[in-house]
Image (tube, coloured by chain):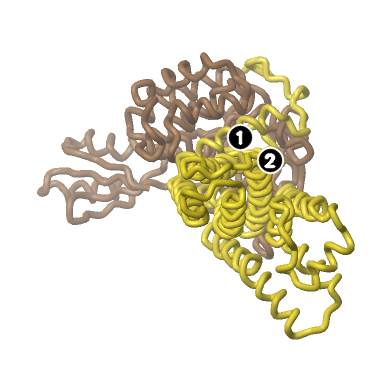
Chain colours: A yellow, B brown
Amino acid sequence: MTAATAPAGIDSSAVSERVEPRLVGVIALKVLREAVRDRWFWLYCAGFALLAAGITTLALPDTEVVGTGGFGRTAASLVALVQLVVTLMALTLGARSLAGERESGTLRFLLSHPVSRTEVLLGTYLGLGGALLAAVAAGFGVAGLVSSFRSAVVDVGILLKIAGASWLMALVMLGIGMLVSVVVRRTGAAMGAALLIWLGLVFLGDLGIMGTVAATNLPAETLFAVAVANPIEAFRLTAIVSLEGSLDALGPAGTYAVDSFGNSIGWLTLGVLFAWAVAPMVLAWLLFRRKKDL
Amino acid sequence: MIRVKGLTKRYGHITVLDDVSFGVPDGEAVALWGPNGAGKTTIVRCILGFLGYEGEIEVNGVDARRRPKAVRQMVGHVPQELDFYDDLTIAETLELSRRLRAVPGSRVGEMLELVDLGAHRTKKVRELSGGMKQKLGIALALLADPPVLLLDEPTSSLDVASREHMIEVLEALETEGRSIILTTHDLDEVGMLVSRVLAMEDGKVIQECAPSELAERLGLRSWLHLIVGQDQQEAAVELLAAHGFRAHTNSAGILVEVSAQRKGKALHTLQESGFEIVDLEVWR
C-alpha cells in the first residue's frame, strides 16, 4: 500500500511547542462560554449584584443628604462584600476548573488536540478571569446605578479603582484555586480545599492577627508584614488607601505602615496583590506541566 | 510511521506495559488486540502524551515526549471513553476542535455528512446515545484529515447498521495511506480492518501475525449455540462427537465448541446429514 506521510497539508515541523496566543484565545473563549452557562456562576453573580444593591441602599443616608460622603460608605461596604463573596466565587471557580475537566474526562479531549498543557492552563485562567471581570463589573455597576438613583454623587474614579482592585483580588483567588485544581484530582476534594483556604484567609487571617496582637508583643513591623502577606488584607488596605481612609483600624501596625511607607503604601499593597496573582499560577504551571499522568 | 520502542509504563509497583516495541509504517493499519486490561489503551494514551512512560515513541520521526503538540497535530484520536463537553452541541464540539486544529470551516459539514450526524448537529452531547457519541468521535478524529489515526474501540457502542457503515468508512481511510492503530477485542473487526495484529496480554505483546492466523496461533475457540428440532438434539450431538467436535445439549438447543475461524464446519456436518438448523448464535 502506498503511503501519504502527511495528508491534508499537515506540516508537523511547523507546529511550535511554544505557547500560541491563538490557541490560548480559543480555550479562553470556550471556558468563558462555559462559565456563562454555569448556574453556579449566575448564582454568585446574582448574589453579588443583589448584595451590592442592598448594601448600597443601606449605606447611603436618607435622600436629602447628597454628596460623596455617602458613596464613600457604600464603597467601604462593597469592599467588605468583595472580601467575602468575590473571593469565594473566584476560589471555587478555580478549584473546579481543571479538577472538573480531569474528572469528567474533557481534559483528555482538549489535550488530544495540538495544544500544550501551558496553553490549557493559560486559556482556562484567562477565560475564568474574563468571567470574573464580568461579575465584578456587574456588582459595581449595580452599586453605581443604585447610588445614582438615590441622588448620591458617585465618584467614578474611586468606583473604578476599587472595582479594579476587586478584579485583581479575584484573579489572586482564581490563581490559588487553580493551583488547588492542579494538585487535587477530585472536584469535591478541590472544592473542600478551596473552602478551607477561603476560611483561613478571610476569617482566621483577620482573627489570627487580632489574636496575635492580643497574645504577643510582636513588633509592629512584623504584625504589618503578617497582615499584608494575606492577599485579602492587602486588598483591604489597597481599597482603604483608594478611599483615602485611615489605617487606624490596624492599630500599631497601621501607624507603623503610615510612618514607614507614607503615600506609597497603596503601591506596596498593590504590589503584594500582583505578586499573589502571579505566584500561585507560576506554581500551578510548573506542577501541571511536569505532571506525568493526566 | 509510528515507532514504539521499549515502551514501559508503571503505576508504582504495577507494570501495565512491559517493554512493548512495534512499528506501523505509512499506509498500514495494525490492531492491538486483547482482553480488557491488556494495555492497549495505555499505549494510545502514551502516544498522545497523556501518560508518562519509559521507552521511545516517534510519530513520523517526531519524538512524542519532546514534541507532544507536534505529534497530536498529526494524530486523529477516537477515545474509548467518549468524554466530550456535555453542554456543547455536536456542531459546537466540532467547531471547537476545528479551531484548535486550525482547519477550514467547510470540514465540519463534510464530517457531519460522513458520519451521518447532520440532522443532529444542534443536539447537545448530553442528549446523544453511545452510538452517536462514537460517530462524533470518529468525525472529530477525521476532521483535520490526519496522517495517523488512533482508534480506541471505535465501533464498540454502535448498532449493527452503524457499525457496518463505520467499518466501510474506516476501510476507506486505510486505503488513503494513513498509519492506523486500532485497539479492539473483536476478532471480526480485526479481520476486516487491519493487515497485522499485535495480540496483547498483561502489558506484553504475545503474538504478531496476520489477522487470519490469530485465532489459530492463540488457539481461540468459540461456541455455537444451535437450535434444532427437539427430537433431533441427541442425534445431532452424537453426530458432531463422531466428527471430533465437543458438543452437548442445553435447555434450549445444543452447544458446539469450534475453532474461532472455522465455525462453518460444524454447520456443514449437520446439514449434510439432514439436520435442520432453525437458529444459531455465536458465543465467545
Residue at image position (82%, 68%) is A255
The quadrant of the image that shows the N terminus of chain B is top right
Q: Nearer the viewer, residue A267 or B223?
A: A267
Mark carried by residue A6: none
Q: Does residue B217 show up? A: no
Identify residue for label 2. A122
Identify residue for label 1. A27
Mark 2 residue type:
Leu
Locate residue B245 relative to residue B253 in the image: left or right.
right
Tell me which corner region of the image, top left, top right, bottom left or bottom right, holds residue A10.
Answer: top right
Q: Nearer the viewer, residue B23 or B107?
A: B107
Residue at image position (43%, 47%) is A39
| CB-based contact (under 8 Å), mark 1 and mark 2 | yes
| Mark 1: few/some/many CA within 10 Å (<14, 14-19, 20+) | many
Residue at image position (47%, 20%) is B111
Is A138 located above or below residue A86 in the figure?
Answer: above
Is B131 located above or below residue B8 in the figure?
Answer: above
| Mark 2: few/some/many CA within 10 Å (<14, 14-19, 20+) | many
Q: Nearer the viewer, residue B76 or B9?
A: B76
Mark 1 chain: A
Q: Earlier in the sequence, mark 1 or mark 2?
A: 1
Q: Say what secondary structure mark 1 lies in.
A: helix
Q: Residue furthest bottom?
A: A215
Q: Residue furthest right?
A: A260
Q: Does residue A75 show up? A: yes
Mark 1 residue type:
Ile
Residue at image position (59%, 38%) is A110
| Residue B251 horizontal/vertical position (percent) | 18, 56
Q: Are marks 1 and 2 on the same chain?
A: yes
Q: Say what secondary structure mark 2 lies in.
A: helix
| Residue B89 horizontal/vertical position (percent) | 42, 31
| Residue B30 horizontal/vertical position (percent) | 59, 33
